[in-house]
Image: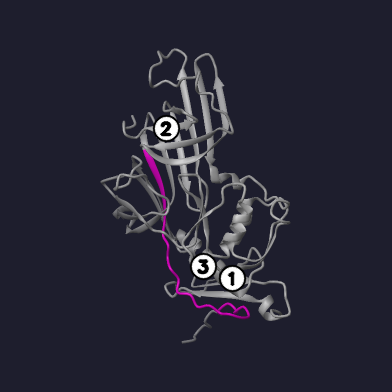
């Protein structure tokens, strides 16, 4: 049975609902929060405080809601789907939804509302503020020289979603999009690795899986991009802008070539390369660890982006990892669990070239010293 302090509250308007058979809430770095709650009751049940009140459980898609786990706000959003089922012996209602910020994953950019959909020489934040003017805007956390650099030319593609449009521009500026517990869209320009607690084999790890591999790390990564030529920016500079990063910790010949997902200058290729390196190096070590309860060492919910210390001889891990995704679950059989997907972040020492794209390094010839 779930612990008394690990209660779940779904609030819609002034009504608060607590009697759930199963719940799941997901938060992920680079994505938007989601939830799914199941209420069920056998017809022969005598009722009571643990049984759902079907006369008041009239929640429908479009209803705004907030969710608390263990008394702490986890999500502010909207119900997207109601799935009800009943037969002679059982009633079921399954509700699912997402964060308020999640609506940008479903809505297309309206070119009429944003002046035709083309932006010239504007910063990412200014473009985002215009595109998100009717849906609450975006909160910028941190800044870098790259994130503040204006984007020369950005064009919305027909029927492109708001999330996809802002996402592809963000990648060239080293910005990651996600949301917070208040339903606010967050644009993270600088990594925030706040404390996230510790995970120790034999103490608080219920189950664990770990994969360590080197297929996603490379000794050399090259990002290519090109833009339309102009009177001041033409020839090879426009056609072959590139950035180059070396990782001296990786041996052997295995270059990785990255083609830009939009027109990019050399400086923009640098930002796109930084962003790509962050993600491809995440998977050098990835672990899925399940712990009892929802709270980290400090008594608050496990947080996406938090740094955790993992000590597990069986997994050959005694290191710091980062929470990329957390899934909170609860049912009457397993109680309250936190499913943590952890990844590593390996830095690369970057050597950047401003000019024509460098050729990939050639493998050493046999017999060469």
Q: Front-most of 126 and 219?
A: 126
Label 2 belongs to which residue? Answer: 9
Image coordinates for residue 258, horizontal then vertical, percent: 59, 67
Q: Is residue 64 left or right of residue 73?
A: right
Image coordinates for residue 346, horizontal then vertical, percent: 42, 65
- Point out the tag, 3 or 1, that comes first from the N-terminus: 1
The image quarter in which residue 343 lies: bottom left
Q: Is 24 located above or below residue 87 in the figure?
A: below
Q: Is residue 359 magenta-colored?
A: yes
Identified at 55% across, 65% down, the residue is: 173
Local SS, label 2: strand
Q: Is residue 293 visible?
A: yes
Identified at 57% across, 62% down, the residue is: 171
Label 3 belongs to which residue? Answer: 274
Q: Quadrant of the N terminus?
A: top left
The label number, if any, that marks residue 269 in the structure image: 1
Report the magenta residues as a range.
337-361
């Amino acid at each position: 049975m779930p612990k008394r302090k690990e209660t779940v509250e779904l609030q819609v308007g002034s009504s608060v609902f607590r009697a759930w058979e199963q719940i799941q809430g997901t938060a992920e770095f680079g994505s938007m929060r989601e939830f799914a709650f199941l209420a069920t009751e056998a017809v022969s049940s005598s009722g009571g405080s643990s049984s759902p009140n079907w006369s008041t459980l009239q929640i429908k898609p479009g209803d705004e809601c907030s969710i608390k786990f263990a008394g702490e706000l986890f999500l502010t959003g909207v119900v997207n789907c109601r799935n009800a089922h009943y037969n002679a012996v059982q009633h079921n209602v399954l509700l699912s939804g997402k964060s308020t910020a999640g609506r940008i994953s479903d809505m297309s950019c309206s070119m009429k509302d944003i002046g035709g959909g083309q932006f010239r020489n504007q910063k990412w934040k200014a473009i985002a503020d215009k595109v998100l003017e009717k849906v609450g805007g975006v909160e910028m956390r941190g800044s870098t020289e790259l994130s503040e650099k204006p984007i020369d030319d950005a064009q919305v593609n027909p029927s492109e979603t708001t999330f996809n449009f802002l996402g592809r521009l963000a990648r060239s500026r080293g910005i990651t999009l996600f949301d917070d517990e208040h339903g606010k869209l967050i644009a993270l320009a600088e990594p925030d690795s706040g404390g996230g607690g510790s995970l120790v084999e034999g103490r608080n790890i219920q189950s664990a899986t770990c994969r360590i591999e080197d297929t996603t790390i490379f000794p050399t990564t090259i990002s290519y991009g090109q833009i339309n030529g102009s009177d001041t920016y033409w020839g090879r500079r426009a056609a072959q802008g590139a950035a180059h990063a070396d990782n001296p910790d990786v041996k052997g010949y295995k270059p990785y070539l990255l083609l830009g997902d939009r027109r990019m200058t050399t400086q923009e290729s640098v930002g796109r390369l930084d962003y790509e390196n962050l993600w491809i190096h995440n998977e050098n070590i990835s672990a899925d660890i399940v712990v009892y309860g929802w709270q980290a060492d400090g008594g608050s919910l496990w947080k996406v982006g938090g740094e955790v210390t993992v000590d597990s001889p069986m997994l050959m891990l005694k290191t710091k990892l980062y929470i990329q995704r957390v899934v909170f679950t609860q049912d009457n059989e397993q109680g309250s669990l936190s499913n943590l997907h952890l990844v590593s972040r390996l830095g690369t020492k970057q050597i950047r070239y401003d000019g024509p794209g460098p050729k990939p390094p050639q493998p050493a010839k046999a017999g060469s010293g």
